Amino acid sequence: MDQIQHKYIDARGVKLHIAEIGTGSTAVVFLHGFPEIWYSWRHQMIAVAQAGYRAIAPDLRGYGLSEPHPEPQKASFNDFVEDTLSILDFFNIEKAFLVGKDFGSWPVYLFCLTYPTRVAGVISLGVPFFPPDPQRYKNMPEGFYIFRWKEPGRAEADFGRFDVKTVLRNIYILFSRSEIPIAEKDKETMDLVDSDNTPLPPWFTEEDLSFYATLYQKSGFDSPMQVPYKNPREEFRIAKPKIEVPAMVIMGGKDYFLKFPGIEEYTKNGKMRDYAPNSEMKFLAEGTHFMQEQFPAQVNQLIITFLNDHIHV
C-alpha cells in the first residue's frame, strides 16, 4: 500500500483526493460505489500497475478525503462524469479505460455516452447498462433499503444510533449477503444486523474497517448518500443510448442485486448487447456485492485480460 501515491486536484472548484500508482502510458480510472472509497480498489490498483498500466482512483466528491459538492442537494451523477473529465484533463490523459463498481458504474456509462472519444473501454463490477426506468422498483416492499434511505432523515436517524465504525461494519455484513436488505415495518435497515454477534466477512479485516471508518469520520454519511440515494435523478435525455467501446460486466453469482426485479434475467439473456454491442458478461459464482475485495485475484485477472485484449483497439 505504501507505493500508492496521493494528491489533490481541483475539479470545477471542488478539491478531489486522488490515489494513483503505476507509470504505464495507458491509464485505468476506478470509480467506487457506496459505502466505498478509493481504498476499495487497492488490490486492483496494484495489480494493474504491475501489469504495466497506470491506476487512478479518486474519492468521489463527498466521499473520503474529497470535498463535498458546494450545494449537496444539487449534486448529481453528472458531477461525477464531469469530475472524471477533470481528472483526465489534469493528467493530460487523452483516452482511458474506466472501471466502475455499484453506482460508480453509472457515471462510467454516462461518461462513455457523453465523451466517447476519451474512453478505450469500460468495465463494471455488478451493474449492467440499461436505460433508467423510474418504475423499475415500484413493487418493492416499503422496507426496501433504497426506499428507506430516500426518506428525509430516515437514514440519518437509523445510522445516528451507532458510531461510524459500527454503521460501516453493519453495511459490509448486510450487503455481503445474497438477500436484498428489506426491513420490517417497525424496524430499520441497521436492525437487520446483529453486529455484536456477527463477524465481518473473512476477506474484510478489522484493519480495513478502521481505514474506512477514519475517512467516514471526516465525510460523515449524509454527503456520500446524496447522489445515489437522496437526490432526485436527473432526467435521462439520450434517446438511443449506445456504448460503442469494448465493455465487460463482472457479476457476482451471490450478489443481492441479482434479485432486484428483472436483473438476473437481463444479465443472462444477452440483452445488454442491444445497448453495448461489444460487451461481454462474466460471472464469479461465489461473488457477492464486494467481489473486488472478496476475490481480488479473480477480479484482477479478468480486468487485466480485458485491458490487454483491448489496449490497441
Image: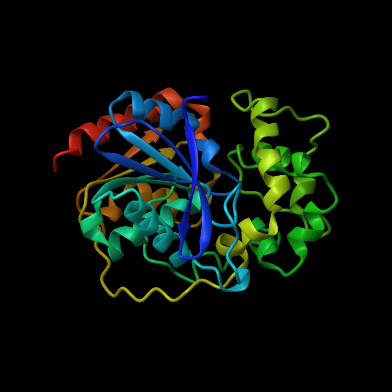
Looking at the image, the residue that sits furthest to the left is 313
Q: Residue at x 31, y 73 (%)?
A: 238
- In the image, is residue 85 above or below residue 256? below
- In the image, is residue 191 above or below residue 5? below
- In the image, is residue 305 above or below residue 100? above
Look at the image and tell me whether residue 287 can be seen.
no
Q: Is residue 179 left or right of residue 293?
A: right
Task: Name the spot of residue 237 as percent of width and height, x first.
Answer: 35, 76
**Type of colouring:** rainbow
Quadrant in the picture for the C terminus: top left
Total numbered labels placed on residues in the image: 0
Rendering quarter of residue 20: top left
Q: Looking at the image, which is closer to me, 90 or 186?
A: 90
Task: Name the spot of residue 199 as percent of width and height, x first.
Answer: 73, 27
Look at the image and tell me whether residue 21 can be seen.
yes
Q: Is residue 95 left or right of residue 215?
A: left
Task: Name the spot of residue 136 as percent of width and height, x first.
Answer: 49, 66
Rendering quarter of residue 275: bottom left
- In the image, is residue 291 above or below residue 78? above
Q: Residue at x 71, y 59 (%)?
A: 143
Q: Looking at the image, which is closer to me, 270 or 173?
A: 173
Q: Looking at the image, which is closer to me, 265 or 18?
A: 18
Q: Residue at x 25, y 71 (%)?
A: 240
Task: Name the spot of residue 85 as percent of width and height, x first.
Answer: 35, 58
Q: In this view, does 42 lie to the left or right of 211?
A: left
